[in-house]
Image (spheres, grey):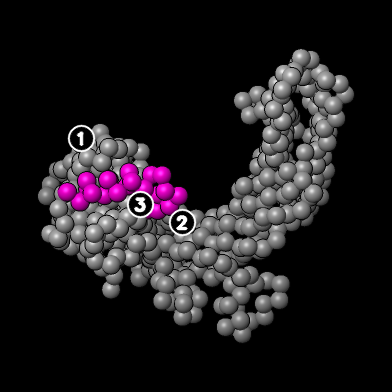
Amino acid sequence: MAGAVSALFLLDIKGRVLIWRDYRGDVSASQAERFFTKLIEKEGDPGSHDPVVYDNGVSYMFVQHSNVFLMTAARQNCNAVSILLFLHRVIDVFKHYFEELQEESLRDNFVAVYELLDEMMDFGYPQYTEAKILSEFIKTDAYRMEVTQRPPMAVTNAVSWRSEGVRYKKNEVFLDVVESVNILVNSNGQIIRSDVVGALKMRTYLSGMPECKLGLNDRVLLEAQGQTTKGKAIDLDDIKFHQCVRLARFENDRTISFIPPDGSFDLMTYRLNTQVKPLIWVEAQVERHSRSRIEIMVKARSQFKERSTATNVEIELPVPSDSTNSNARSSMGSASYAPEKDALVWKIKSFPGGKEYMLRAEFSLPSITAEEASPEKKAPIRVKFEIPYFTVSGIQVRYLKIIEKTGYQALPWVRYITMAGEYELRLI
């Protein structure tokens, strides 16, 4: 078992202790001063961004948010990643209670902060960090207590992320499969970076304590069941689940089973490091007719199947920073000059698959330029878009079953969407 944290400190930007909670009695408040001295010493060091500092038998793990440092001190050998994740969850809880986590909000709510620290960590071990559950029995001015309440069952049972007694007239589950395509194309038209980051985002409005089972076209699962996988199965990398998913069951038979939290949450994220064909290809040519006028000709082509349509397409074309008097004509959509971005922004509301559109734009330039003009930085073409009912990876939800002891019928809704992430083409 990993070691326990000795104390948790909340420090201001100058390293002064705002609040600290001693969990094991083997460190003192002076540890904060030692930590900050060590941190200042490391400022010139290339590794100064490391979130772990070691000094004289004590390990310090910290994160900074706004003008506050959250820091743990430990004499035992702790799991650094789990403690850093815990600190980020503490930030989320404080933001849920106080809107913004800042030095002022901590000073104004120090009683609630101590209560929360006592509930989120016990004897140096992280406990439950679900803000919705904590707000049911730790009340600030925003959550006034009218009667003395006992802690909700979620605190004392194995399902810390869901309260008992949730009731809805209409039981529904909404599952969005959202994929972001990241592409970087160099000036020769070669793809030098390409990956897909996906997320299964859920919104659940279910009564009681439902058990959900989700099936995907996962190659490992289908092969284990003896089903043919030709062209239909996918290999998912870097899978990360919400804490509600039973990991032991997934590792055993690849079944995703869980009792969902109430409301919105990310059930799972994944990554696919595959060569992705650019869904929207943009080529641009720049012609300088004289010192005072340039012309840009742009060709945009959709490279996905005709049955799909990209929506809210936005193509950002870099232009010289001193451009004026823009005049743009396009075969589809509208184009406008955005001087704050030094770019021409071409917007197309609907871009069907297998189509090609053209844009021609003219800009005036100042006739007088500096004698020692610095070479202009070449910015990439940036593209934004959304393609509903389409995924690059080919991921499919084969089934989503909801089982509850009362036997009610629930409606699962599934939709797919692909959007541009970091989508850049250095082709201008």
Q: What residue type is labelled 2?
A: Asp
Measuring from the top left, give residue 119's x and y in whole percent. Answer: 20, 56
Magenta residue check for 52: no
> Can you say whether 319 is above or below 47 in the image?
above
Instruction: Say whether residue 421 is visible.
Output: yes
Q: Residues within 10 Å of mark 1 (few under 14, many from 20)?
A: few
Q: Which of marks 3 and 2 is nearer the N terminus?
A: 3
How much space separates mark 1 and mark 3, taking CA atoms? Answer: 21 Å
Residue segment shown in magenta:
30-51
At numbered mark 3, what does the secondary structure look like: helix, strand or loop? helix
Left or right: 256 with respect to 359?
left
Count of numbered labels shown in the rendering: 3
The residue labelled by disc 2 is 266
The residue labelled by disc 1 is 108
At numbered mark 2, what does the secondary structure look like: helix, strand or loop? strand
Measuring from the top left, give residue 338's x and y in whole percent. Answer: 66, 26
Q: Nearer the viewer, mark 1 or mark 2?
A: 1
Which residue is drawn at the image coordinates 42% and 62% (left, top)? Answer: 242
Nearer to me, 49 or 172: 49
Magenta residue check for 35: yes
Task: Point out the residue furthest to the bottom here.
Answer: 226
Left or right: 56 with respect to 266?
left
Predominant SS of the magenta segment: helix
Which residue is drawn at the image coordinates 58% and 77% (left, top)? Answer: 220
At numbered mark 1, what does the secondary structure look like: helix, strand or loop? helix
Q: Quadrant of residue 346?
A: top right
How much space separates mark 1 and mark 2, taking CA atoms? Answer: 32 Å
Measuring from the top left, give residue 408's x and y in whole percent. Answer: 41, 65
The residue labelled by disc 3 is 88
